[in-house]
Image (cartoon, helix red, strand yellow):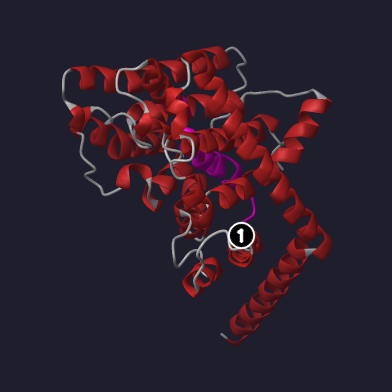
């Protein structure tokens, strides 16, 4: 079994914090309330550029940890139940506390989060989950030379060409799509086949991360000054080459991290299992609607207070949602829900195996 790399767990936590920060900036209305060419405007977009690669990091992590792991279907059942119960809980609280206008359709959507696409990333991951065994088989069957060619091909087709052309030619929705998440899963899985224990590489990767973020936002500012607004955000996309560079740089740093501090490991172990719950809670459509333009007033703060305000707000949302999900996690453990789903899967697998043996004997 592959040794657990706590740097990967730390990146999972950091990525979720960055995702919350992105939502504070965009859904919270700050990006659109800031006066163009003001200090707050530049600071807001710089933060956006620094955090934008977070979703890519998540998909890369999935491929890295999943490519050599036994595929267990009960895990997607656990995530689905988590999404459903969290959504139902939020909907019920807002309905009975009269905090928002809740209809029967809200409860239906909470019960069917995939069908209603309540969480775009989870919907994409749900589809990807059932293809993972086949993607893993492909990656594990290829020689290293072939894996390199595959990695270059994925980046060229889905990142380089759309970035250079400025066109979403393969309908990836600029990264908000299952196909892009699958492409990153493959890249993460390929990386697992090329272990690199060079510690010094971390500093080079950190430099590349900041270069990628700087080029992305710098291109936006230059394009705006030249009145070419249509091109201004062409590098501020999930699948832009610079954002792939940012995500992969952080990913390589995480893969090569060696966290030995017992205190740090305990903190990481506490927050890592809560990351998905933090995502589900704060992006729930009802909560997301509450967050809409909620922080637009930050655009009028002084430049000195602006960044701390955004970071502290993101930290507050992160911790509150984490605390709520920790209660959910305790309830799941008390109910032994995961063990129950695992037992059901084992019984189904044993039954199918038994039937296959009988069928082969008849043949």
Nearest to the observer: residue 13 or residue 38: 38
Residue 3 horizontal/vertical position (percent): 72, 36
Q: Which quadrant: the N terminus? A: top right
Residue at the left extreme, as displayed? 227
Residue at the bottom extreme, as displayed? 362
Residues in magenta? Answer: 49-71
Q: Residue at x 76, y 60 (%)?
A: 332
Vertical order, 110 against 261 (above or below): below
Q: Residue at x 59, y 61 (%)?
A: 94
Q: Residue at x 28, y 39 (%)?
A: 157
Q: Residue at x 65, y 45 (%)?
A: 321
Vertical order, 251 against 96 (above or below): above
* Residue 297 appears in view: yes
Q: Which residue is mark 1?
A: 90
Is residue 50 located in the magenta-colored stretch of the structure?
Answer: yes
Q: Please tell me how crowded label 1 is: few (under 14), some (14-19), or many (20+) other residues with Cα within 10 Å.
A: some
Nearest to the observer: residue 279 or residue 268: 279
Q: Is residue 350 left or right of residue 303?
A: right
Q: Is residue 183 left or right of residue 195?
A: left
Residue 344 horizontal/vertical position (percent): 71, 72
Q: Is residue 44 left or right of residue 339?
A: left
Residue 216 horizontal/vertical position (percent): 34, 23
Vertical order, 247 against 325 (above or below): above
Is residue 173 located in the magenta-colored stretch of the structure?
Answer: no
* Residue 189 appears in view: no
**Quick one: SS at disc 1?**
helix
Nearest to the observer: residue 352 or residue 258: 258
Nearest to the observer: residue 285 or residue 273: 285
Q: Which quadrant: the C terminus? A: bottom right
Residue 315 horizontal/vertical position (percent): 62, 32
- Considering the whole magenta stretch, tell me its main secondary structure: helix
């Amino acid at each position: 079994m592959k040794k657990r790399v706590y740097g990967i767990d730390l990146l999972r936590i950091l990525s979720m914090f960055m995702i919350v920060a992105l939502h504070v900036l965009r859904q919270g209305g700050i990006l659109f309330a800031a006066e163009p060419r003001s200090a707050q405007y530049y600071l807001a977009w710089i933060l956006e550029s620094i955090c934008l690669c977070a979703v890519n990091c998540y998909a890369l992590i999935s491929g890295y940890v999943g490519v050599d792991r036994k595929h267990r279907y009960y895990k997607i059942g656990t995530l689905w139940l988590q999404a459903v119960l969290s959504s139902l809980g939020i909907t019920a609280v807002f309905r009975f506390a009269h905090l928002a206008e809740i209809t029967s359709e809200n409860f239906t959507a909470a019960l069917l989060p995939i069908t209603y696409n309540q969480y775009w990333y989870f919907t994409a991951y749900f589809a990807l989950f059932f293809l993972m065994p086949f993607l893993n088989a492909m990656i594990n069957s290829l020689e290293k030379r072939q894996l390199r060619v595959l990695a270059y091909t994925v980046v060229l087709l889905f990142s380089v060409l759309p970035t250079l052309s400025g066109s979403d030619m393969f309908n990836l929705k600029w990264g908000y799509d299952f196909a892009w998440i699958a492409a990153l899963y493959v890249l993460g899985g390929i990386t697992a086949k090329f272990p690199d224990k060079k510690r010094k590489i971390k500093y080079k990767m950190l430099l590349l991360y900041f270069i990628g973020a700087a080029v992305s936002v710098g291109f936006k500012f230059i394009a705006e000054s030249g009145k070419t607004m249509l091109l201004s955000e062409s590098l501020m996309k999930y699948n832009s080459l610079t954002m792939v560079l940012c995500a992969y740089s952080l990913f390589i740093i995480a893969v090569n991290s060696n966290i030995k501090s017992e205190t740090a490991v305990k903190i990481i172990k506490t927050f890592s299992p809560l990351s998905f719950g933090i995502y589900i809670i704060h992006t729930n459509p009802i909560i997301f609607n509450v967050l809409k333009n909620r922080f637009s007033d930050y655009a009028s703060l002084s430049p000195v207070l602006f960044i701390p305000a955004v970071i502290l707000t993101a930290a507050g949302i992160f911790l509150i949602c984490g605390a709520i999900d920790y209660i959910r996690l305790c309830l799941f453990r008390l109910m032994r829900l995961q063990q129950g789903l695992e037992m059901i899967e084992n019984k189904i697998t044993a039954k199918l195996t038994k039937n296959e043996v009988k069928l082969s004997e008849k043949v």
